[in-house]
Amino acid sequence: MKSEMIEQAYQLAKARYAELGIDTEKVLKQLQDFHLSLHCWQADDVKGFEVQAGSMSGGIQSTGNFPGAARNIDEVRADVLKAKSLIPGNHRLNLHEIYGDFKGKVVDRDEVTVEHFQSWIEWGKENNTKLDFNSSSFSHPKSGSLTLANPDKGIRDFWIEHTKRCRDIANAMGEAQNDPCIMNLWVHDGCKDQSVNHYMYRHLLKESLDEIFAKKEPMMRDCLEGKVFGIGLESFTVGSHDFYTAYCSKHNVIQTIDTGHYHPTESPADKVSALLDFIPELMLHVSRPVRWDSDHVTIMDDPTTELFFEIVRAGALDRVHYGLDFFDGSINRLGAYVIGSRAAQKCMLRALLEPKETICKYELAGEGYKVLALIEEEKALPWQAVYDEFCLRNDVPVGQEFIADIDKYVADVTSKR
Ligand code: RNT
Ligand code: ZN
């Protein structure tokens, strides 16, 4: 695309938004300051690098067998850097514990240390990429259906030890990058069929969390992620949303909103304003559920758009961490990263461009139809011209031009895997 054309379209859009009292230059600065945390696990269908890795378990599933998945640490790094080169702005990388640099050795989950993440820390520094982290309780012989809530003390202690070690690693990452590392804790604990010991499981999970969080780790931040159910664990989820909302608000812990983790008609966006007065911050796992928590690639659909609007409307931009969490193995994985990340940015851009002050005034004056009118108009305002300008200024392909870059990467790199 010719840059003059993009520039002309942007100038028209700028004037159009100015009429509504929106300064697109200010918004472009805000968007530059909006950092996603790219999830490393889209690159290899959540396999990781454990020498002893078995098949995937723990209520999650990646479907599809598209060729070219990353097979090792170098390939994941190369793919992530390629993805970053096609996404405007600068973004963080979210690592799971199973993506440690284990150098061909068997390192069990209760043995992991920062040494296994030293090369990631260096990679992050070299590539101007801050790191976030996750403990990994799935895909392990001791996962079963219960980990931190397991009545067997031996198994429970194993996972407590794992999670404590992960917090130490996250803290070391935070120190090295001089910016807190956000560590998400999601465990799949639940029951496939009818069960009766629900209070016991939840009490055990609470006790495990209390023990895990007892140590102060100043350069990391904990966040807790609940969900409705996992595959094979359909009947009961220990870490439900109610459980974590209560835990997070009582202990001042960040809560994670995964957009695929609610009942199909429940709005993840509506959680934002409900939680903000009771928890310190929010972590997002932006994903796309299709009929279940299928982790399809994020697109600019209504639920995702509403989520970002709610954050901006609440004035909570600096109280949210923006993780992505989709893993589609049925399409080009690099394409998945680029589409999902750009879609999240577009949702954020539209939210930043909303003529919020005017709408607020109308709402408080009881002028309901004007509220509706402006919300409707927003949808077709020339935000795309502002996004194109953002890409241009960041020196990344504009619009669908990234397809050619991905085709080239397939020809040069992934087709040879
Ligand atoms: C699972 C949770 C969890 C995982 C990742 C891999 O339902 O969403 O966040 O997807 O940690
Ligand atoms: Zn998630």
Image (cartoon, grey):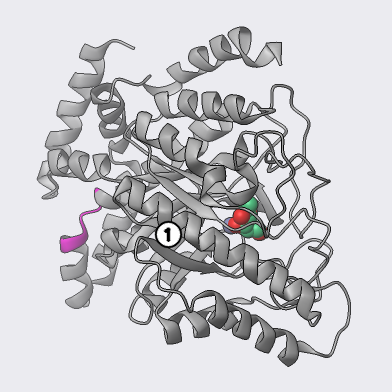
Relative horizontal placement of residue 343, taking residue 356 as reference (left or right): right
Residue sitting at 76 percent across and 49 percent down?
61
What span is colored magenta in the figure?
Answer: 353-357
Pick the front one: 302 or 128: 128
Pick the front one: 371 or 170: 170
Q: How far from the left and from the top, in percent, is residue 160?
A: 64, 71
Residue sitting at 74 percent across and 22 percent down?
67
Q: Within the image, what quadrant is residue 199 found in?
A: bottom right
Q: How far from the left and from the top, in percent, is residue 200?
A: 74, 90
Quadrant placement of the C terminus: top right
Residue sitting at 78 percent across and 30 percent down?
65
Pick the front one: 405 or 48: 48
Q: Is residue 31 above or below residue 267?
A: above
Q: Find out whether residue 354 is within the magenta segment.
A: yes
Q: Is residue 206 above or below residue 104?
A: below
Residue hosting label 1: 307
Is the stretch drawn in magenta largely helix, strand or loop? loop
* Figure quarter occupied by ligand 2: bottom right
